Image (cartoon, grey):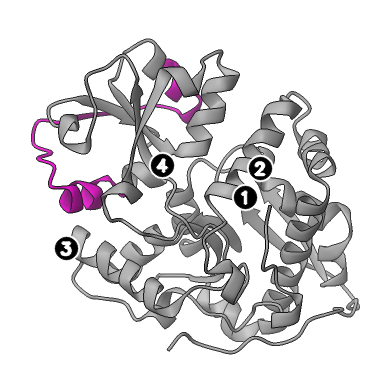
Amino acid sequence: MLAGAATTLAAPAIGQGKTKLRMILNWTYQGPQAWFFLAQDKGYFDQAGIEMVMDQGNGSGAAVGQVASGAYDVGFGDVNALIRLAGTNPEEAPLCVYQMYNKPPFTVAVLQSSDIMSAEDLEGRKLGGAANDGALKLFPAFANVAGIDTSGIEILNFKSNLREQMLKSEQVEGVFGYVNTIRFSAKLSGMNPEEEIRFISYGDYGMDLYSNGIIVPKSMAETDSELVKGMNWAINEGVKDAIADLDAAVASVAEREPLINKTVEKERLVATLQDEMNHPEVAEHGLGAVDPERFKTAIDIVVEANDLPRTPEPSEIYTDAFLPAPEDRIYKLL
C-alpha cells in the first residue's frame, strides 16, 4: 500500500514565523509554473507559514538530485529519476508528496522532413539534449522497452535553450524533451511544430509512466509533516486559481520573466493541463494522488528497463500522507 492517509488542511493557521524553503523548478519560468507563482502571489504559502524561494531549473531529472544532495528543500522533478535513485541508493532518495504530471510527456522530436518514422529508425542516428533532461535520462529505458539497438546512436549534450535550433539546423537528427516543452519552444523559435516536427513518444511504446511531482527530503516528511501539508495545500490552491483564470496565471509568470510571449505561454499552460496532467485517474483520485496499481507497474517498468539492483517499494517513492483532504482536491482540469 502507499504510505499515509490524506489529512485536512482546509485553512492553515498563520504561524509565529515563516519557514524559508528553497525550491528548484524543472525548467525556466514558463506557463506551467504559474500555480507556484499564484500560490506565492495570493499568500497561500504565507498562510501555510512558508517563505518560498523558487529558482529556475535545468531539467526535471536534475531537480531530484538537487533535493537529494541538500542543495534545495523542494523540487519539481521527474519521479522516474527518483525511482532510479531509490533503486541504486535508497538512503539518498527523497520522496514525492504530490504527483502533478500523471501522463508520460517524454519524447524524441524529429523533423517531419526526416526519414525517422518510428523508434527503430532512431538506430544509428545523432540525437541530442540537455544532460539533465528527463526524456534523455529515460532513453536507455525507452530503448530497452522499444527494442532499439543503441550501439550506433550518438548523443550530443547541449544547453536546453539550444535544443530547437539544433534540430531546425539539422545539427542533430532528433532531440529529447517533453512534448509540450518542445512544441511551444519551437513555436517561439519561429517553427511551425504541427507541420515541421514529428514526435516519437515513449508512451506510444508501452511506457505508461508518471513524470513530474513535488519532491522533498524524507527527513522533512518525517519531522515537518505540517509544513509539507501546508506546502501541498498552497500549491493545490494555486492550481485551482490557474485553472479558473488562465490569463492571471500567465500574468504571474510574466511578473518573474517579462520577456515571455504571453500568448504562447497560455497555450503551453493549457496543453500541459490537457496532455500531461489529465489522466482519467484524476476524476477518481484527484490531482496529486496516484493509482496504486498503475504506480507500482510504472516502478517495475523503470526498474526492469534500467536493470536496477533493487525494486523500491511504492512507499519509498510516493506518499499521499500530505495531500489535501479529498474534498479539497482537484478532480477536473480543463
Pointer 3 and pointer 2: residues touching (CB < 8 Å)? Answer: no
Q: Which mark sits nearer the N-terminus, 1 or 3?
A: 1
Horizontal and vertical percent position of residue 58: 51, 40
Horizontal and vertical percent position of residue 255: 83, 36
Q: Residue tagged by mark 1?
A: 273
Q: Eyeballing the image, is 270 above or below 84?
A: above
Judge from the rendering whether residue 65 lies leftward or rightward of residue 52; answer left or right. Answer: left
Residue found 82% across the figure and 53% down from its top: 244
Quadrant (top left, top right, bottom left, bottom right) of the N terminus = bottom left
Residue found 57% across the figure and 85% down from its top: 222
Q: CA distance from mark 2 to mark 1?
A: 5 Å
Pointer 4 and pointer 1: residues touching (CB < 8 Å)? Answer: no
Q: CA distance from mark 4 to mark 3?
A: 20 Å
Q: Residue tagged by mark 4?
A: 133
- What is the span of residues highlighted in magenta in the rendered image? 138-166
Q: Eyeballing the image, is 175 above or below 135?
A: above
